[in-house]
Amino acid sequence: MDVRAADVFADVAAVLGPKKETSSNCFCLSYRIGSTENQALRGPERFERVRGLCAEDPPPGVLAYDGAEPVGWAAIHPRADTTFATNRRIPHVEGHEDPWSLWCVRVRPGHRKQGISHQLVAGAVEFARVNGATVVEAYPVDNRGEKVDLTMAYVGTRALFERAGFEYVMDTTSVLNGFTRVLMRYTT
C-alpha cells in the first residue's frame, strides 16, 4: 500500500466523487470551504472546485493506492484554511497556533477491513509533517466500541487515532451519530 498526495483529480474523484457529475454529494468539501460556497456549488461546479483544490500546493489530502488503483482518502489541511478555524463546537486549543486538521478518512467498498484506514492516518500525518506541520488534530467520535453508522464513520474513531499515536485533548460539543466528537492531537 502506498499513500501519497492527492494531486491527481481523477484518482480523488474515483474515491470520493459521485457516479454522475450532476450529483451534489459532499466530495469532502463541507469542512474545506465555507458553508455558503459549499451549498451554492452544484454538480459539475463541485467537480471543478475539487479539481482546483487538487492543483493547489499542498493538495487537499492524501490517497492510498493498491498498485495503481486509488482505494482510500484522508482529508488533511492547515486548520486555518478550513471551516474548523471558526467552528465553535470544535474549539481551538491554545498553545499551537497552526495545527493541521485531519477530518475525513474513507476507504472504498471492497477494500475495507484491510488496515487501510490506519495507513491513511499515518500517511496523512507524514504528508502534514513534510509540508511544515508541527501538530495534527483529528476530531473523531468516541464510540466506546459501539458500531458507527457507515455514513458517519468518515470522521474515524478515537481508537483509530489512539493507535496512530494521537493523544486525547478534550471532548467537544460536536455530536455525530449520537457520539461525542473528541479533539485529539499528534505532535510531528
Image: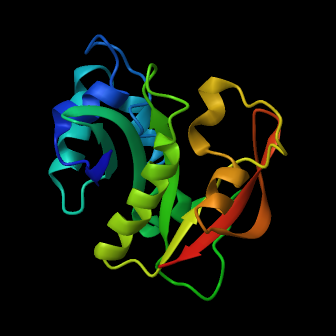
List x then y, in percent, for residue 2.
Answer: 29, 48
- Front residue of 67 and 152: 67
Indicate how the structure is coloured in the image: rainbow
Classify 45 as above or below 100. above
Q: State left or right for residue 11 relative to residue 34.
A: left
List x then y, in percent, for residue 166.
Answer: 63, 68
Residue 32 visible (yes or no): no
Q: State left or right for residue 186 relative to residue 65.
A: right
- Given the current orientation, which residue lies at the most extreme bottom position? 95
- Label total for image: 0
- Front residue of 33 and 188: 188
Classify 55 as above or below 68. below
Classify 8 as above or below 56. above
- Residue 52 occupies which quadrant of the picture? top left
Classify 73 as above or below 163. above
List x then y, in percent, for residue 163.
Answer: 64, 59
Q: State left or right for residue 67 relative to residue 80.
A: left
List x then y, in percent, for residue 67.
Answer: 22, 36
For the N terminus, the quadrant is top left
Residue 117 visible (yes or no): yes
Q: Which residue is drawn at 78% across and 49% down?
A: 142
Q: Which residue is drawn at 63% across and 72% down?
A: 92
